[in-house]
Image (tube, rainbow, N blue to C red):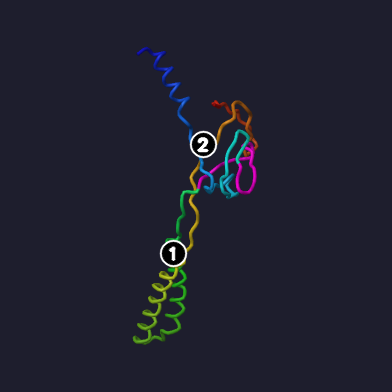
Amino acid sequence: MTRNTFSTMVLLLLTLTPAASAAGQQPGETVRVSGDMVAQFVRADSMGLHLSTGFVPYGDIESLELKVGSRSWWHVGLLVGLGAGAGVGRVVATRVGKGDLGSDTAGAMLGLASVIGGGIVGVVIGASTRTPKFTSIPLPAPTVGLVGNRDGHGSLTLGVSWRF
């Protein structure tokens, strides 16, 4: 196989292979546009995206993400609960402990129980707090054009658009 034949085959393969883009999304999937607008995907065309909240042109989209699940915050709840329990435990141990061995031991046990109880409550609250997880979706690139970034600097974008 000659080099030109191989190059032609690679170019043909790249041309026929569909890119993972906004057009590959299924209607009804949840997407996040430009980091703040969350909506249901309806369809995409050559001008932009049709979402459950309305039409968004590609020029107005800074980023596009697909919802892929959710995550819980049990570990953050555990830390907050342990901290709150330690604070309450410190107050309880100081109030109950009067300097003799029996009351100091009781104060320490009540303080430890507060830390453990606070940790358990924190885990339960954190596990019930769920937030969506998103993954980035590549957007169709313009053929040739100038693109302005958030920092005010422009950049030249070159790309290829294949239409059938």
Q: Which residue corresponds to mark 2?
A: 21
- Report the amino acid beneath label 1: Leu
Q: Is residue 106 above or below residue 36?
A: below
- Report the amino acid beneath label 2: Ser
Q: CA distance from mark 2 to mark 1?
A: 40 Å
- Foreground tag (2 vs 1): 2
- The residue drawn where x is 47% and y is 71% is 84
Q: Name which quarter of the figure residue 115 lies in.
A: bottom left
Q: Is residue 27 found left or right of 114 in the rendered image?
A: right
Q: Which residue corresponds to mark 1?
A: 79
For the residue pair 33 and 80, the one nearer the viewer reads as: 33
For the residue pair 164 and 47, the one nearer the viewer reads as: 164
Q: Position of residue 23 (x, y in %)?
A: 53, 37
What secondary structure is marked by label 1? helix
Q: Position of residue 122 (x, y in %)?
A: 45, 68
Q: Is residue 47 found left or right of 81 in the rendered image?
A: right
Q: Is residue 32 above or below residue 2?
A: below
